[in-house]
Image (spheres, grey):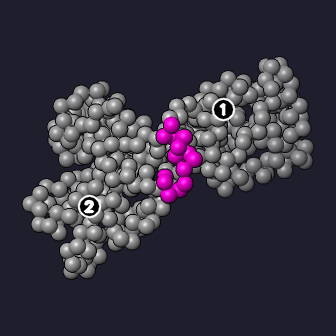
Amino acid sequence: MVEKIRLADVEHVPTDDLVPLISERFDNLVTVAVAEAVSGYVPQRTRRLLRRPEWRQDWQDALLCADGELQVATERMRYTGDPRLETTEHRLRRVRVRRNEAGVLVKKLRRDDFLGSVERRAGTDSRLTAQGWLRLAFPAEYTALLAEERARLNVAEPPGDPSFRDVHEQIEHACAHGLLTAPRTPEVDSLLGAADTVVRHTAAEDAKDQEGRNTALRHPLLLGRWENALRELGRTTAVRARAETPHALGVLPDDFYALPRPEATGVLNARRFLAALQQRRLEYKRYVRQLTQALRERARENPRVLAAAEAKAGASARLAERHPREYAHVLAVLRPFEERDGVLPQDLVSSPRRAELKREVLAALANGV
């Protein structure tokens, strides 16, 4: 079992030693995120680690979790007159500053991922764009050439990708076909066959235990039922917690401080539990993100997928060779829009102007340009 680290320990742990600690335990990542936000002594390497592209989304989730925990703590301290309130409020402000920074970096990450995607890169390549439009202009010919290329490379026609209703069905399919492997313990099997009320009770006990984690709930095949249980628990708790929504605590209502002490204590306890549920939902999203990323990487590395892409590229090139005049015409239409030789601007890729150009080019090719 990976050890739990304390806030005061973060500045003393070498960054390389932190990586396995925060990879295996989300609560450790929350601790490191808070320490980085409030302490001036955390190593620069640790600060840079959290901002690296592969950690940004997890860092943002950890800060969102810490925000909820600290908000609930300040509410309780303010109600009870706890002398630690000022220190905790300072931590909450610093965490929210970091949360905003992480949000900006995550948006940049998503934009960079979008712009760097295979489809987007192909859209900025004049040559690949022209070949793609030729495939639409001469579909039967392209289909025949593709079959020849597949035969030459001994690549079978790829089966149609299965359609999934949601990500959990995709994960279940991956587990069934060996693309994801995770041992099934007796507790996992028991929860898979259990009633929804049993899973909700298990999820509630897991959320209440801040020190431990129920590993069975985190099995790939149980993630969907865990998320459903957390959603239902959040829905029923939000009313008792006087929260804006099951996903956001919001501020305490104005009449809270006028409530009788037992009732006020019940509200504070409900808000603490709701914050824990929100933490677990962030943790759930992290597991799903890790699994889907692993599936995408394996798909890209699949030899069959690579060979199919090679066959498509070969057929497209041969189609251009068969229709040099038409290919040259498409390139000539695209040339005035290029930023530099063979490269189209990013803002043209999904613009109405590109769609208009495509329609004009296909109409011209159909008329025998």
Q: Which disc number belongs to residue 287?
A: none
Is residue 272 shown above or below 242? Answer: above
Looking at the image, which residue sits at the far left? 83
Quarter containing the N terminus: top left
Q: Which disc number belongs to residue 177?
A: 1
Judging depth in this view, the residue of 219 and 288 nearest the camera is 219
Q: Which disc number belongs to residue 72?
A: 2
Q: Amino acid at mark 2?
A: Val
Is residue 81 shown above or below 335? Answer: below
Q: Residues within 10 Å of mark 1 (few under 14, many from 20)?
A: few
x, y percent for residue 185 = 50, 35
| Label 1 vs 2, first from the N-terminus | 2
x, y percent for residue 170 = 63, 43
Q: Which residue: 28% across, 55% down?
A: 69
Quarter containing the C terminus: top right
Q: Quadrant of residue 215?
A: top left
Q: Which residue: 86% across, 28% down?
A: 147
Judging depth in this view, the residue of 22 and 206 nearest the camera is 206
* Segment colored magenta: 186-199
In this rendering, would 310 be left or right of 294?
A: right
- Magenta part mainly helix, strand or loop? helix
Q: Which residue: 84% across, 42% down?
A: 137
Circle 2: element type: helix
Q: Quadrant of residue 71?
A: bottom left
Is 218 a magenta residue? no
Judging depth in this view, the residue of 369 and 137 nearest the camera is 137
Judging depth in this view, the residue of 199 and 219 nearest the camera is 199
